[in-house]
Image: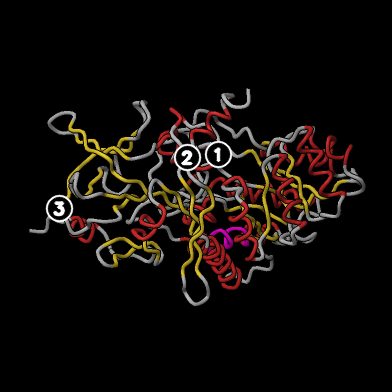
Amino acid sequence: MNTKYIDLISQTFDFPQEEFKLEDKTLEFHDVDLMQLVEDYGTPLKFTYLPQISNNIQRAKGWFAKAIKNNKYKGKYNYCYCTKSSHFKHVLDEALTNDIHIETSSAFDIDIVENLKVEGKITDKTYVICNGFKRAQYVTNIARLINSGQKNCIPIIDNYEEIDLLSEEIKGKFNIGIRIASEEEPKFEFYTSRLGIGYKNIVPFYKNQIQDNKKVKLKMLHFFINTGIRDNAYYWNELAKCLKVYTSLKKICPSLDSLNIGGGFPIKNSLAFEFDYEYMIDEIINQINLACENEDVAVPNIFTEFGSFTVGESGGAIYEVLYQKQQNDREKWNMINSSFITTLPDTWAINKRFIMLPINRWYESYERVLLGGLTCDSDDYYNSEQHMNAIYLPKYNKDKPLYIGFFNTGAYQETIGGFGGLQHCLIPSPKHILINKDADGNITTKLFAEQQKSEDLLKILGYHGQ
């Protein structure tokens, strides 16, 4: 009988896969020996596999280059990284080796940009796309960046007051973009995004505040929807409305030459994940081409702001199953040595699912379980997998440690979880490991951050230094 965990996975999915395989009966991720990582550093731990950041950037660049060539598209493509997905220096350093640009969301982002500029990672030619609702400090920082020579810094106007606020602090002329307030899917609790300016108001806004303003030049129209880039009627309908605004605006605004289609590419959340990135990009380029041709206007340069797609698939977390609690005749709770709420907050906040696989014991029989975290909070659990609506793991055995990994967790989890700060029930943040691979395929690891100690948390709480 096929009762081993390896049998379950092999019968359910196409396995091994590009990033996952078994070596000596334990799991490897991009050729990284995960059991060796556990033995070297212990658990719980988080890791960032840096080469995957460059890999995904180059994949997207290749898809756009192919689509531009196939469609004989006359505009250029610019890849921007959405820094809010992960602000860590090791992430930005890796991403910026790929000739990319930056999208920011708030005032302190600009300080990071300036830091990277001093190091030579960013130049005056780098595009810095400034999104978000802008008030005093953000406006001041954007102005400082532009005044220092960053002429390719483009503030994206989010409301009717921002042009005046920016004009007060920026010396000389500057470029801007306008964000479209897209309409949300019917299932949303609100009808129109709070971000940007409504479709019908953009042309009047241009005529009233920009057309005769000699200090400001409109260069970019920004389009993004919360659900991301998906092959469904909603996305294509919103894109068509966006292109109608672009072509209308282009006819009266010669300086407009760029369309920012935002981010929103999905990342792999299951061993059964399928998404035709190449088709989507080709069809987006085709639709832009057709819309501009029909209205007899020049096609725009294309910008994207991929965040999760850039960094998400580089991250992972590894835990040990400490104990199994049989709570009734059907439910077995495997307790991990950390917390889902604190280390993978999206599992708790938005019911997000990541790829979850055991690291070891693949050739043993399996059972259905629930996973529980260490906090005394009823919501600190993980109960179903994206690909099978249940969790199956090798059977618990107190004499045989079981380690489990969550993969493609690299976007948002550290910042939403409050990296380096207080954690729910004072559960410490895990240690964090950086993993790299050289040109010869040799893998190296480095400790980025130790696991939090009680002293770290007590100091934040005010118990030290009194």
The residue identified by callout 3 is 365
Q: Amino acid at mark 3?
A: Ser
Say how many tags the image has.
3
Residue 321 located left or right of residue 278: left
Q: Indicate the position of residue 31 as horizontal and vertical percent values.
A: 39, 67
Q: Are marks 2 and 1 in contact (CB under 8 Å)?
A: yes
Locate the C terminus by quadrant. top right
Name the image quarter holding residue 338: top left
Residue 241 located left or right of residue 387: right
Is residue 383 depicted above or below 35 in this figure? above
- Label annotation for residue 429: 2
Q: Residue furthest top?
A: 466
Q: Which residues are magenta?
A: 282-289
Answer few, some or many: residues within 10 Å of disc 3's Cα (few below 14, many 20 plus, some between 14 and 19).
Answer: some
The residue identified by callout 1 is 420
In the rendered view, how is the structure colored? Answer: secondary structure
Q: Amino acid at mark 1?
A: Gly
Q: Are marks 3 and 2 in contact (CB under 8 Å)?
A: no
